[in-house]
Amino acid sequence: MKLCFSIALVSMSIFSIKEDKIYYIPFDIPGSQMAATIPPFGTFIESKYKKDKSILKHELAHWIQYERMGFVGFYTTYLKEYAKYGRKYGPMEKEARMMSKKITY
């Protein structure tokens, strides 16, 4: 049985994220990251952060961006912003931080 998380955002549609796309991994992700979302493959979160819902919400925000932008748009934009602003300060990262505050889980 596959469960889905429904994410309702202010002035946005409802998106469903399949629980089977969330993986808790037993090792550290390089680069001081705690998690990484790699659509369409999944969200990978270091197991030590399994109870930290703020990390999960941030990564789910990236899934919403992916749903909105599509594969090419998501990766093209993210990689351009990464090159220009670095990992933490690009517009997509800022948007994901803002969106994660509005996600109910």
Image (cartoon, helix red, strand yellow):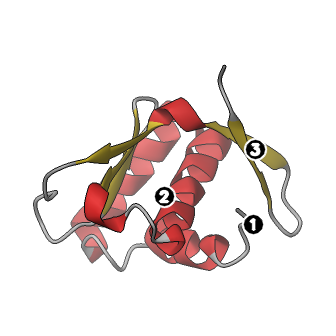
Taking the view exactly as shown, the residue that stands out farthest to the right is 11
Which label's residue is closer to the chain start, 2 or 1?
2
Q: Residues within 10 Å of mark 2 (few under 14, many from 20)?
A: many
Q: Which mark is residue 15?
A: 3
Count of numbered tags: 3
Say which mark, if any, is on residue 104.
1
Q: Do the numbered discs 2 and 1 sit on residues whose CB atoms are within 8 Å?
A: no
Task: Compare marks 1 and 3 and give the one earlier in the sequence.
Answer: 3
**Front label number (1 vs 3):** 1
Q: Is residue 23 above or below residue 103?
A: above
Residue type for callout 2: Glu
Residue 88: image quadrant is bottom left
Find residue 104 and report its horizontal and vertical position in percent. 75, 66
Q: Please, what secondary structure does the residue beneath circle 2 have? A: helix
Q: Earlier in the sequence, mark 2 or mark 3?
A: 3
Residue 68 location in percent, x, y?
67, 45
Disc 2 designates what residue?
59
Q: Quadrant of the N terminus?
A: top right
Kind of element beneath mark 1: loop
Counting from the top left corner in percent of width and height, residue 8 is at 82, 58
Disc 1 packing (10 Å; few <14; some 14–19; many ≥20)? few
Q: CA distance from mark 1 to mark 3?
A: 12 Å
When the figure is inspected, residue 10 is found, relative to residue 25, above or below; the finding is below
Q: Callout 1, which amino acid?
A: Thr
Quarter that holds the C terminus: bottom right
Spatial CA span between label 2 and label 1: 13 Å
Q: Measuring 51% from the left and 66% from the top, which residue is drawn there? A: 58
Cα distance, mark 2 to mark 3? 13 Å
Specify the farthest residue to the top.
Answer: 1
The three-letter code of the residue at mark 3 reads: Phe
